[in-house]
Image (tube, helix red, strand yellow):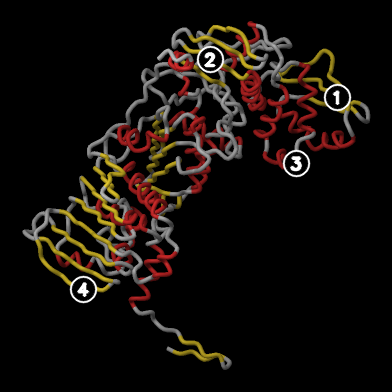
Amino acid sequence: MEQTTAGNRRRVRVLPDEIANRIAAGEVVERPASVVKELVENAVDAGAGRVRVRLEGAGKRLIAVEDDGEGMGREDALLALERHATSKIASADDLDTITTLGFRGEALPSIASVSRMRIVTRPPEASEATVVRVEGGKVMAVESAGAPRGTTVEVTDLFFNVPARLKFLKGDATELRHCVETVTQLALVHYDVGFELRSQGRVSLAAPPGQSLEERAAQVAGAEAPGGLYWARAEADGRELVFAFAAPHEGRGHRRGLRLFVNGRPVQDRLLVRAVTEGYRGLLEKGRYPVALLWVEVPPDEIDVNVHPAKREVRFRDEGRVFRWVAGFVAESLAGAPWLSRGAVTPAPEPSRRPELGRVAEAVAGYAERVSAGGGGRAPSSPPARKSRAGAIGRLRMGGAPPVAPSQPGLRFDEPSRGPYDGLRFLGSVEATYLVFQDPDRRELVILDQHAAHERVLYERFLGQGGGRPVQRLLVPVTVECSSAERAAFEERKGALSALGFRVEPFGDTALAVTETPADLPAAAAEAVVRDILGADPAEVAEGHDALARRAACAAAVKARRALDASEAEALLRALSAARHPSHCPHGRPLVVRLGRKELEGMFHRR
């Protein structure tokens, strides 16, 4: 058809199949790992119990995927090479209830259009296999042969007819890493399926069939978490979560250690990344990311898995609810620092094709309600009451914190001695900065950074001021002499100071009077906090209460080189033990180091 407009001649034409297929291939096939992903997903959907992947030249020369699944007859094998041909859906309604990995019907023809492909497939009822040879999208031969049940797809000379695409591939080491990561991701979802990946004849990944989720995660991802993985499980409102995580101090400077799965599908989802990161608030330093795995199960009609050609992304129908639920679940799972618990054992998730989850709906729903009421996705304002469960690492719980009695100036906390630091004996301090304790049960030295520990305690209490936490009225107000800039900032930030538990009033033209402070804060620290909040960067103030609570805690916490006596050190330890996150300061830095007998003996060459 031709169209002419003002001397401008345009020609609209239907593209030939060859060009259309190459365009489709550009959406689906980015690199060898894309081919591996599509072929392995097809194998899993075909009911394979074992999947073997063989690579040469990091997949550039050869990608072979062999499975023992259902296989195909001759007619289906040829039809599978047509665009939009699929056995996964039959009507538009099926798009709302997709449970398979592949469904678009574009993978095989797209891959075949930019490679030389050989398919060998036999269903269980057939006496012989069908062999189909394809080159650049054109079927070159169809033959019969003997072969075991299942399907083998061999892809050679990837991008042989698209040299521009071939130029953009990275080196073999990089491309192989992507292939290994792709198979690893699928192995972490389909843990009952056996996977083997070989490159240049060497085994890069071997996972036997019939494993539990815990066994598969320990084998495939365990090397990324030398300290082990901790498990938490939850179910509420038809949604299910499994969370496996390393201690925060084992975090990385990149996101590759964070793996996300939705309804049995590995995804790269920004919403879930933000939700998990929110749950880690105050436990990771800036620029660090957790080593963690999160499996999410929601009803199929609540997500759209058809938003990306390669199915790497999903879209949730109610993103706000999912964000709050995941962030709350992660925060509850991390509460109490299970990696500090003595003798704790992670419970293995129930074995099944997809994770079966325990029911702790009230804890997660309670967190979601608190976050929704407070806004901004902040962590709960008060630490939950501790509940222990035999053998459970993921201590999901809810409730209020024990009452805090007002204290006199100094480090005095009337908190019950219950938590990960029970039974420690104070030995002394180093440089009046690091508190040294002995753990007689575990035969370890425990070293605390006194400033970071006190900072964590105060931070959580500042977060709780809006929830009716006690304040103390000062008999003698603390006077703060202000610069003109500080005096001007006061009018803008007095609400923020009030939310932290401070009552501050103008005192003449150039000063302020602090008449109330949080009950457990020494009056001497009031001036430092007020000055720090008044001098904070506007961008930090705009971040909200959480950022100001961190700043106030840092200003008020006991400083390095300030010697603590035994009673103060023990009081600080008790208060820290009752904290929601007793292992990291509010900026995400670890505040405790444990040295076991083996480490000490090694230092003295006594092994």
State which quarter of the image contains the N terminus. Answer: bottom left
Direction right: furthest residue: 509
Res. 446 mark: 2
**Mark 2 or mark 3, which is nearer to you?**
2
Q: Which residue is mark 4?
A: 140
Q: CA distance from mark 1 to mark 3?
A: 21 Å
In the depicted structure, whether residue 61 falls above or below residue 327: below
Circle 3 residue: 538
Foreground tag (4 vs 3):
4
Task: Label 3, secondary structure: give it.
Answer: helix
| Residue found at the very far bottom of the displayed protein | 7
Inter-mark Cα distance, 2 to 4: 70 Å
Quarter of the figure that contains the C terminus? top left
- What's under tag 1, amino acid-wise? Val
Question: Left or right: where does residue 24 sit relative to residue 254?
Answer: left
Q: Secondary structure at mark 2?
A: strand
Which type of secondary structure does the marked residue at label 4 adopt? Answer: strand
**Image-based side of 524 in relation to 273, left or right:** right
Looking at the picture, how far across and down is residue 242, in whole percent?
Answer: 39, 35
Q: Secondary structure at mark 1?
A: strand
Q: Is residue 380 above or below residue 477?
A: below
Q: Position of residue 366 (x, y in %)?
A: 50, 31
Residue lying at 45% horizontally and 40% vertically, measured from the top left: 257
Q: Tell which circle, 4 or 3, labels the residue nearer the N-terminal end.
A: 4
- Residue 506, relative to residue 420: is it above or below? below
Q: Residue at x 42, y 58 (%)?
A: 308
Residue 160 lies in quadrant? bottom left
- Callout 2, which amino acid? Val
Q: How crowded is the residue under tag 4: few (<14 C-alpha within 10 Å), some, or many (20+)?
A: few
Q: Amino acid at mark 4?
A: Met
Foreground disc of the pair 1, 4: 4
Q: Give whichever of discs 2 and 3 has the lower sequence position.
A: 2
